[in-house]
Amino acid sequence: MADTGYPWKVVWITGASGAICGEIARRLAAKGVKVAATARPSERLDALAASSPNIAAFPADVLKPDELKTCAAKVEAELGQIDLALFGAGMYVPFDIRNIDLDGFRKTMALNVDGVINGVAAVLPNMLERRAGHLAIMGSLFGYAGWPGNGSYGASKAAVINIAESLKLELRGTGVDLTLISPGFVDTPLNAAYDPKKKLFVMKKERCARKILAKLPKRPYEIAFPIQVEGFLKTVRDMPRFASFPVVRWFIKATGA
Ligand SMILES: NC(=O)c1ccc[n+]([C@@H]2O[C@H](COP(=O)([O-])OP(=O)(O)OC[C@H]3O[C@@H](n4cnc5c(N)ncnc54)[C@H](OP(=O)(O)O)[C@@H]3O)[C@@H](O)[C@H]2O)c1
């Protein structure tokens, strides 16, 4: 087999019809990696699969654990063992304290949290059995600190960060690695409802995918960017709360974020 430059032959991606993971799928496929692309059935998913002979569509709903397990088994039967599983299905809803969108909150928690753990449960037993594999989970820097308007999305990503930490601790010595991917703002349909003036250091999906793929083969625990947003939110998280709340309020006033 030709050298793809990547350490994976078969990559399974959920949220593959979306902006960031679609871009990752196309870049991997262009190098000869076999990509199993999962999202709910749609023309977008079909178009992605049609864009490269190395991308095959494996439609499934990440909210349905049995369907996802069957999907992962199908990928392994048709393409070979999954070397890297990237869990990228996700959504954002605005959070308005005067009119909390409870349905949106529940849907966000379900997709961003259950959708990840359903995927992990579908592939991890096989990876543990063969003592090899790589899990990559799409988190967000906004999981590190509470932020106005982010009560749903931030809560879901905070849960994802905790899941990633818990798994990472237990995976030691198993041969299976885990990477948490924590971008800041990326210009995609996911955050179309977010006030554009408040999206600081926003980047294009192409740059985001490039940054992820530059580091993912080294199997780090976390890939986080941009550094300004990472530095600020992680610092705020580590500060005592009597200090962090005024700092966040000052920052928002000063930058309009
Ligand atoms: N955009 C950002 O600023 C940003 C920043 C940090 C982290 N992230 C994270 O990166 C990931 C990708 O974000 P994105 O901006 O590329 O999002 P996106 O373009 O909106 O894509 C979302 C993906 O999730 C899939 N999906 C939704 N519901 C699903 C379900 N029930 N079953 C299977 N797939 C489902 C969608 O496919 P279908 O609807 O076709 O099924 C689509 O492929 C998300 O986890 C997001 O939280 C994004």
Image (cartoon, grey):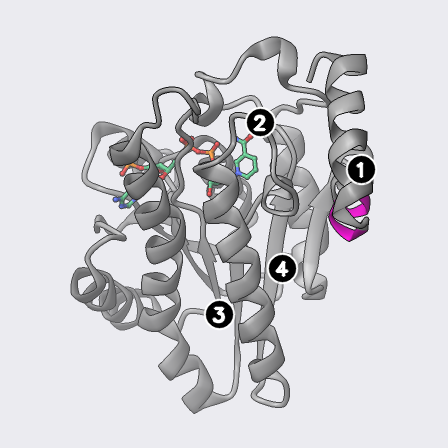
Q: Nearer the viewer, mark 1 or mark 4?
A: 1
Across and down, in percent, residue 57 comes to 27, 47
Q: Label 3's element?
A: loop
Which disc, if any, is residue 83? 3
Residues at marks 1 and 3, CA–CA distance in whole angstroms? 34 Å
Q: Is mark 3 within 8 Å of ligand 1?
A: no
Tell me the kind of residue under disc 4. Tyr
Q: Which residue is mark 4?
A: 6
Q: Nearer the viewer, mark 2 or mark 3?
A: 2
Which disc, if any, is residue 148? 2
Please report whichever mark, 1 or 4, sits nearer to the chain's N-terminal start: 4
Residue 29 in view in this figure:
no
Q: Label 4's element?
A: loop
On the image, which quarter does residue 235 sit in? top right
Please tell me which residue is depicted at 27% across the width and 53% down the height of the picture.
62
Please report whichever mark, 4 or 3, sits nearer to the chain's N-terminal start: 4
Q: Which residue is mark 1?
A: 232
Tell me the kind of residue under disc 2. Pro
